[in-house]
Image (spheres, helix red, strand yellow):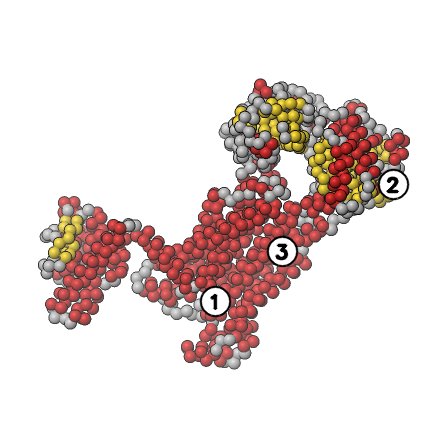
Amino acid sequence: MARMSTREEHEQLELLQGTLDLLILQTLAFGHAHGHAIAKSIERRSEEVLQVGHGSLYPAIQRLLKLGLIVAEDGLSENNRKARFYRLTAKGRKRLYTETSKWERFSEAMGRILAPMAEENE
Amino acid sequence: MHWWKSRREQLEDEIQTHVDFEIQENIDAGMSPKEARHAAMQKFGNVLLAKERAREIWGWVWLERLLQDVRYAFRGLRNAPGYAVTVVLTLALGLGSVTAMLAIVDSVLLRPVALPHPEQLVMLSGKAQQDGRTYALSYPKIDALRHDTRSFTAVSGYNTMVKPVGTSDGTRMAVLTEVTPQFFKMLDVRAKLGRVLGDADEKTPVVMVSALFWKDWMHGDPKVIGSTVKISGQLRTVIGVLPEGIHFPLGTEAPVVYMPIATGEVGMFSGDAATVMARMKPGVSPQQAFADASSVFAHSGTGGTQDRDTLEMHSYKDYLTGDMQRPLLALLGGVAILLLISCANAANLQIARATGRMPEMNVRSALGASFGRLLQQVATESAVLSLVGAALGGALAYALIRTVKAGYGSKFARFDELTIHPGVFGVSVALALLAGVLASLAPALSIRRHTDVGLMTKRATQRSRLPGLLVALQIALTCVLLVTSGLFVRTLRALQDVKLGFDPRGVTTMVLMPEDQHIAPEIARQTVARLLERFAALPGIESATMQSSLPFSNFNVSLNGKTDVNGRVFHEGDTAFYSLVSANFVRASGIDLLRGRGFMPQDDSSGAAVVLINQAFVNKFLAGRDPLGTSITMHRDPGDKDSDIPFTSAMTVVGVVENDLQGGDLGAPFEPMVYMDYMQLPISSGFTSLFSMVSQFAVRSTLPQAAVDKELREAIKQVAPNMAELGLQPMDDAISGSLQQRRLALRMVTGFGGVALILSAIGIYGVLAYSVSLRRREIGVRMALGSSRAGVVRIVFQQAGKMVLLGLVPGAAAAWAAGHGLKSFLFGVKALDLSTLGTVAAVLLLVCAMAAAIPALRAAEVDPMEALRAE
């Protein structure tokens, strides 16, 4: 991903559906968070390259809830507002592990395929 | 739905919180509140879309959307009431007539066979090799079929007649059906009370009765089993009552008495033959059964002339509904055309609406509505319209059925039982939905095309050809219906103009039957003579005659006999019908005497038989000869004994009369007839048995009908108290009665034609009005450039004319084909009748011109300045 972002510095990548799910799970691996915090965390950790249309976060969250990978609970935010927090389930943690290793293999493969082309273009 | 609502609110709250956090963050980063809100919203993206997608994950969203779409559809339709009302009425008319027609077809063709496994039931009859006529099978043949076939679980016979039956209420005419003992077991029917007939009842004096007989004639008495009824002087014990809904043998509810016959001996009333019905074994195909029965039939010969005959087999259902099947299916075709027209109309109106809504659709598409979602919405609107139309159509069908039932219930078999069955209504609702979906398909596709092109405005230049084609299709179909009704009108007129061959005015016909059917023929003949004498003596009665066959009567008996004409070599097929009349026949019936003389009183005693023949007889046997004085005899086949011939002596022709109607159909061809004085028939002739069955009379009088009826009835009571009256009506009533079926068909087809015409007019009006509204600017520019108002009107009329002509040409061809298909219903008019076609074309053009006038005038009123300002 880092390699791709070098080609056009300002391009913000649109996320594939499955990717967003994975990113949300990854974010929640550090602890529970509410929707806004998840969005911010993804932007920050991808150095603002992965632009999460915040709106698209919510369908993804509902999907993960339905699959039982995360659960929701009411809580108070850092500035003392009522918010809905999400947390990984055991099943979600397991899924995060398998998905991550799958992604690593995938991006490694993509990287090998695309590397010569990227060099030619430079 | 509470949890659903709270879940929705929770999602909304959550998203609101999210946006609030973002705004707060932006403010903290130094933005103004306004900028902060703007940036937050931009970052979040389409809020509605996010909510909708999230809810989609939950499932159920289709239901929510459906409700939403239905609400939306109603709201949209409230804003376009003219459109909604037109579409609903269009569909209601189409679906209403289809539902009514389906109900009639269902009630008349499908329901009557309400017996277990009706598909296994077949009718068997013999078919004469000589003249192709079918006849009931003899008892030996029935026994052979019963014992030697392997394909049937049972083979049974029955005979049906109308006989006087006495109950505690007195004696009345009832349908009497003689059945072989196994009959009801074969039908697989159980008794409502008591039991059904069985083998042990073969020679015992027992009867079963139909549910209606039990209800009407026995007061629905639950203890009726064991009581007696009197048939032809004999007391018979009631052993069972059939359940309601078993309408055997007429297929319609009737008071029927069933009594057992034994195939071993001659029946109580009928000779030694019966109509045969059989049930095929499960899994046996009709072809196998037919082959099996045919081979048994062929090998059970008795050495007579019938040995070369063949067996015929029909399904019970066809047998029961045969005469109604074709006319009803033809009417169903007419209704299908009507449905097509209304669907085309609805589709056209929807195309116009969809095109008018293009800008709205484009905006919604741009706001993120998917094509599928828009499609769903359009389909929902159509479905809502269709269902409302179906509901109205159902009400219309109900009203139609009630009207038909009230008007014709007593006149046609099974019309008294007409009802809309739930299944039939279900079919029509399915049709409504299908029509709705099909109608929405066209506009929906046009939306797709237009969104793809990215069209943002109503463009006058890009008009679809589809609406015009649909109107042309409507015109073509309307043309077919109108031409067909035109042909029916001419048929009815031709039938009314048929030369009857006799003068029906002032003639009253009468059918009498001896209560005791075992009365000796000779005694019955004397009763007829006494009645005639008495009738003739009544004040105001001009003359009276007996006639063994009366025009339009259902009780005609005539003899179809091979005939030798002196001076002519006999050929196979040289047969004529022999009918008995009395001396006053020519005067009383009013038949036209073409040559020679009528009967005279002295003919009776002279000994030499004299006869009258009709024109058809002359044409067939005596063309080019002087018929008077010709001698005719009944033909004797080699081996025939005297007893095989109904009448052995020679007959001399003394007069020729006009062709007289024999059956009940004015359009039927005339058969060669020989009229013989009933007193000249020797006692030894088998034909005399007809006197103990039925006697028919025609009486001529100038008195008012009520007075004639009263006089005749009193005379019968005095002279022949043991004769029951089967019918008494003026001949004129019989004539108009015989046209009933055609008149009903005519009314229905004309009704369809009228509705089709209205729909087509609406269609033309709709398309033109819409097209004018699209072309306002173009018309304005034309006028600004010097076109006159008359010129503008001409443009609109040209467009209308094009659609009409495009429809008329194929319409005329299709009408010709339809006329050809309906040939057997036509009389006195050809399938291609140019004057009918011309009239229909003129009517269509006129109606279309009227429909086009309003949009044309509206076009003429376009203000060129307004159009130019808009440019």
| Disc number lying in front (1 or 2) | 2
**Residue A112 at least partly seen:** no
Instruction: Kindly identify which residue carries mark 2.
Output: B597
**Residue B29 at least partly seen:** yes
The residue nearer to you, when weighing B444 against B9, is B9
Q: Are marks 3 and 1 on the same chain?
A: yes
Disc 2 crowd, CA 10 A, few/some/many (<14, 14-19, 20+): some
| Disc number lying in front (2 or 3) | 2
- Give the chain letter at badge 2: B
Q: Give percent across and percent down for residue B285.
A: 53, 31
Image: B458 above or below B176: below
Numbered disc 1: secondary structure? helix
Amino acid marked by disc 3: Val
Instruction: Kindly identify which residue carries mark 3.
Output: B483
Numbered disc 3: secondary structure? helix
- Give the chain letter at badge 3: B
Amino acid marked by disc 2: Arg
- Decide if residue B46 is on the left or right side of residue B124: left
If you read the primary sequence from the N terminus, does the residue marked by circle 2 or circle 3 appear first? 3
If you read the primary sequence from the N terminus, does the residue marked by circle 1 or circle 2 appear first? 2
Which residue shows up at 47% across the image and 57% down it? Answer: B88
Q: Give percent across and percent down for residue B486.
A: 64, 55
Alpha carbon separation for disc pair 2 and 3 = 47 Å
Q: Give percent across and percent down for residue A41.
A: 13, 58
Q: Are marks 2 and 3 on the same chain?
A: yes
Q: Give percent across and percent down for residue B249.
A: 60, 33
- Decide if residue B188 is on the left or right side of residue B72: right
Which residue shows up at 54% across the image and 33% down it? Answer: B244
* Rendered-image quadrant of the C terminus of chain B: bottom left
Instruction: Kindly identify which residue carries mark 1.
Output: B770
